[in-house]
Image: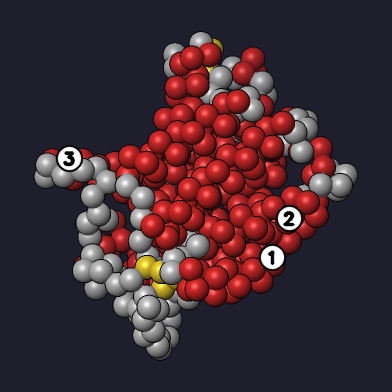
Amino acid sequence: MREYLLVLFIAAALTYLITPWVRSLAIKAGAVAKVRDRDIHIASTPRWGGFAMWAALAITLLMVSNLNLVGKSFTRELLGVFLAATFVVVLGILDDRFELDAITKLAGQSLAAGILLIFGIQILWIPVNGIVILPTNIGQFLTVIVVLITINAVNFVDGLDGLASGIVAISAAALFGFAYLLAVENEFPRAGAPSLVSALMIGLCLGFLPHNFHPAKIFMGDSGSMLLGLMLAASAITLSSQVDINAAFSESLVPALLPILLPFMVLAIPLLDFILAIMRRVRAGKSPFAPDKKHIHHKLMELGNSQQRATVVLYLWTAMLAIPAMASAFLPLWQAAVIGLLLLILSLAVNKSKLDFTTKRVKIDFE
């Protein structure tokens, strides 16, 4: 555990230190989000936060590669995750600067999923009427679909300052907790790509959040949302592939089915927002990727919540689903349910409070 905490700390510190430099670079390059009618932010804000996170990711991996436990996680799978992450960050950097069309981005995301497949990262089984071992082509197809949905779910929820980075940090923490505790309880190897990738994501998000929470000094942009979405998907898929499916019906391994189900729980809020947005836009005869101001966070703000309060409420909703789902693998269901209920009550209290974190903001227009 200490080595993973070290990884988390290094990733967070590097992201925090690198982000201001990337911010200056984005301003000079013109990678700036100007204020549009559908936007919530009131000042032009540089993007490329994903570039800062990727740089911190690369340096962290170089620094921790020789650690006794973490070093054993440097497998072919981890290389595949890093290469796919690099590809989507490059794609996102271009999009943040030149605003690529949706089809180009979707094709690029599919190629990134293809990189994961080349390095052996794919869904091998699903819990349907027991355990179903998937044919290779079906497993590959489902892998691509999961990667695309996860990337775009994170992208869709990235609508408020600090929202996506906080939600991904909570989701990654739930995945890490499940992966590590599962290994400890059932004497699985504690060194693995799922635990390492999850710890890295937590660090990247926590290091970026001080620059991104309202009022944001920099946005993660598509470079960041695609990076985090891909890493989340890859972490969940590699986790499911490392579980002994023969133990799925063993009384000693009750949580064996959770590796497939947990990602949907930790990403429930982004996925719900993604599905509702697609349905809403298709019903209106628009492109599924056409932007609007009807996301969940918009609805919360329409109810009178400030941007900061809406963000914190969505953090708590994510935790309300993710933490009990993870805890249910190791605690009685009633205890996991109590945790979820307490988080729900806390979210309702915050929603009614005056938690505004009021901060003055100077409007700057980068031309």
Check if mark 3's residue and mark 2's residue have beta carbons within 8 Å.
no
Q: In the picture, which quadrant includes the C terminus?
A: bottom left
Density class for disc 2 (Cα within 10 Å; few <14, some 14-19, many ≥20) is many
Q: Amino acid at mark 2?
A: Thr
Q: Which residue is mark 3?
A: 282
Q: Is residue 48 visible from the viewing direction of this image?
A: yes
Q: Position of residue 156 (x, y in %)?
A: 35, 51
Q: Residue at x 48, y 14 (%)?
A: 137
- Picture quadrant of residue 203: bottom right
Q: Are marks 2 and 1 in contact (CB under 8 Å)?
A: yes
Residue 315 seen: no
The label number, if any, that marks residue 60 in the structure image: 2
Most extreme residue toward the left is: 284
Task: Give the x, y percent position of residue 335.
Answer: 53, 46
Question: Residue 356's mark?
Answer: none
Mark 2–mark 1 distance (CA, rounded to whole Å): 8 Å
Q: Nearer the viewer, residue 274 or 266?
A: 274
In the image: residue 282, left or right of residue 230: left
Amino acid type of disc 1?
Leu
Residue 348 position within the rendered picture, expressed as x and y whole percent measured from the top left: 35, 64
Mark 2 or mark 1: which comes first in sequence? Answer: 1
Q: In the rendering, which numbered label is found on residue 14?
A: 1
Task: Work out whether mark 3 precedes mark 2 in sequence or the reverse, and give the earlier one.
Answer: 2
Where is residue 169 drawn, in percent x and y?
A: 55, 56
In this figure, what is the number of numbered marks? 3
Q: Is residue 2 left or right of residue 35?
A: right
What is the distance, in whole Å, between disc 3 and disc 1 at their CAs?
41 Å
Name the element at disc 2.
helix
Q: Are marks 3 and 1 in contact (CB under 8 Å)?
A: no
